[in-house]
């Protein structure tokens, strides 16, 4: 009785592994109600834990893709998939004017609404057209965005590092800020 049960468990496990490895990350995004172009062309490998939705995708190198704004993708992009959203995003940043902001989450409330929301931290959400992300874009190899350092009269107080928004902050709110280029 133990052997047939073990065989059934092995068959189920093998089919789960096979089905996740035979789908592309773009198919997985689509099946979660998300546009496949949230990730650029050139994903060389991806894994997903079906129980948690945690995924990891790999590119040959970090790169930039042009949508309504520029997006930067590290060689490894991770996140947690649920229907209509990706949380705990790591490895993606979006440019607004001349600043780069880390993308922390992506949400599509209703695909027919035509809107994709990007959480860039501190309650700030950027809104983009769903149609902009329907097709994965080409991604040109590039280094990570440069650091931005903010100074007060005593020296540097805030540094937005090129590790996609990791923040060192010894900021006294009364300080006047200026940027260094």
Image (spheres, rainbow, N blue to C red):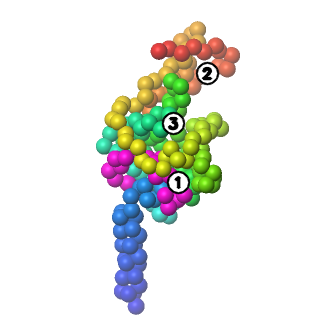
x and y, in percent, of residue 60 in the image: 31, 43
Q: CA distance from mark 3 to mark 2?
A: 32 Å
Magenta segment includes 6: no
Q: Residue at x 37, y 47 (%)?
A: 41
Q: Which residue is mark 2?
A: 171
**Residue in the image at 40% along x and 31% along y:** 144
SS class, disc 2: loop
Q: Quadrant of the N terminus?
A: bottom left
Where is residue 152? Give x, y as percent: 58, 12
Instruction: Work out how far the residue at label 1 is from the one at label 2, CA to CA, in angstroms.
Output: 38 Å
The span from disc 1 to disc 3 (Cα, nearest Å) is: 17 Å
Residue denoted by label 3: 68
Residues at marks 1 and 2 touching, judged by CB atoms closer than 8 Å: no
Residues in magenta, as a range? 30-48
Q: Which of pointers 1 and 3 lies earlier in the amino acid sequence?
A: 1
Q: Residue at x 53, y 25 (%)?
A: 97
Specify the label residue 34 is tagged with: 1
Answer whether residue 31 is magenta in the image: yes
Q: Nearer the observer, disc 3 or disc 2?
A: 3
Q: Is residue 118 visible?
A: no
Decide: is 159 above or below 164.
above
Residue 181 in percent (x, y) is at 47, 15
Kind of element beneath mark 3: loop
Residue at 57% from the left image edge and 14% from the top image edge: 178
Other-residue count near label 3 (Cα within 10 Å), few / some / many at <14 / 14–19 / ≥20: few
> Quick one: which residue is furthest to the right in this view?
174
Quarter of the image where one finds residue 145: top left
**Upstream in sequence: badge 1 or badge 2:** 1
């Amino acid at each position: 009785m133990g052997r047939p049960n073990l065989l059934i468990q092995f068959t189920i496990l093998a089919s789960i592994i096979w089905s996740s490895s035979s789908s592309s990350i773009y198919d997985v995004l689509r099946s979660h109600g998300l546009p496949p172009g949230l990730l650029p062309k050139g994903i060389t490998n991806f894994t997903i834990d079906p129980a948690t939705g945690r995924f990891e995708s790999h590119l040959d190198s970090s790169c930039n893709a042009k949508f309504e704004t520029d997006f930067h993708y590290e060689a490894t992009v991770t996140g947690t998939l649920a229907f209509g959203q990706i949380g705990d995003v790591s490895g993606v940043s979006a440019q607004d004017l001349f600043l780069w902001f880390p993308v922390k989450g992506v949400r599509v409330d209703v695909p027919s609404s035509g809107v994709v929301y990007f959480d860039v931290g501190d309650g700030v959400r950027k809104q983009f057209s769903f149609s902009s992300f329907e097709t994965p874009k080409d991604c040109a190899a590039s280094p990570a965005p440069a650091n931005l350092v903010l100074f007060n009269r005593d020296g540097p107080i805030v540094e937005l590092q090129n590790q996609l928004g990791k923040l060192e902050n010894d900021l006294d709110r009364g300080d006047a800020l200026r940027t260094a280029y």
